[in-house]
């Protein structure tokens, strides 16, 4: 399994573990998906790399080619991401923008007072999304190191 297949498998395991469990052979599925992603990236790269300007230095060229690769990865991988449930969250009430923990706790108590089960579901969803963001951050850092 290539790095794209491994990355997507980790993301799907966090975002939708039931889907991964429902697959007959998750390793084969994500291996095939990783190969497909890699082929699409390779196909997209030449158009994003552009041509070599005459005055371009070696380091500028390396930067341009790395930027093109990262852009191609971002474009292609976006098509293979697990579905997001973030449409449930209100855009105006984004907890990340709140000033204090007290504001967050008050909002949680008021919002979920009538339905504790919904609060539990939302907290589990938030935890999965947080883990997914961490994996994406680590994956990007790993790709920059290569």
Image (tube, grey):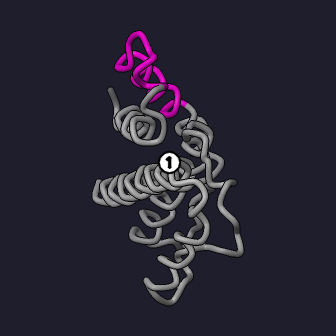
Residue labelled with disc 1: 121
- Left or right of 104? Residue 127 is left
- The residue closer to the viewer here, 62 or 25, is 25
| 27 inside magenta stretch | yes
Q: Quadrant of the N terminus?
A: top left
- The residue closer to the viewer here, 122 or 22, is 122
Q: Is residue 44 above or below residue 115?
A: above
Write the residue at 40% across / 21% down. Answer: 21
| 88 inside magenta stretch | no
Write the residue at 58% across / 54% down. Answer: 115
Write the residue at 41% across / 10% down. Answer: 24
Magenta segment: 19-39
Q: Position of residue 90 (x, y in %)?
A: 69, 66
Q: Is residue 81 above or below residue 25?
A: below
Q: Position of residue 137 (x, y in %)?
A: 38, 60
Q: Is residue 69 visible?
A: no
Q: How many marks?
A: 1
Q: Position of residue 52 (x, y in %)?
A: 57, 60
The outermost residue toward the bottom is 99
- Left or right of 92? Residue 34 is left
Q: Is residue 11 above or below residue 145?
A: above
Q: Is residue 134 visible?
A: yes
- Left or right of 130? Residue 110 is right
């Amino acid at each position: 399994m290539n790095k794209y297949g491994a990355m997507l498998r980790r993301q799907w395991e966090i975002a939708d573990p039931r889907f991964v469990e429902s697959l007959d052979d998750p390793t084969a599925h994500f291996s095939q998906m990783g190969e497909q992603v890699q082929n699409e990236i390779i196909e997209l790269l030449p158009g994003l790399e552009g041509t070599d300007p005459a005055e371009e230095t070696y380091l500028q060229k390396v930067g341009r080619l790395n930027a093109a690769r990262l852009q191609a990865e971002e474009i292609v991988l976006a098509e293979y991401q697990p579905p997001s449930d973030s449409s449930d969250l209100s855009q105006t009430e984004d907890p990340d923008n709140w000033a204090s923990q007290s504001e967050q706790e008050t909002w949680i108590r008021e919002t979920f007072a009538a339905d504790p089960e919904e609060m539990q579901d939302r907290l589990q969803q938030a935890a999965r999304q947080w883990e997914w963001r961490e994996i994406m951050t680590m994956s990007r850092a790993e790709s920059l190191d290569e």
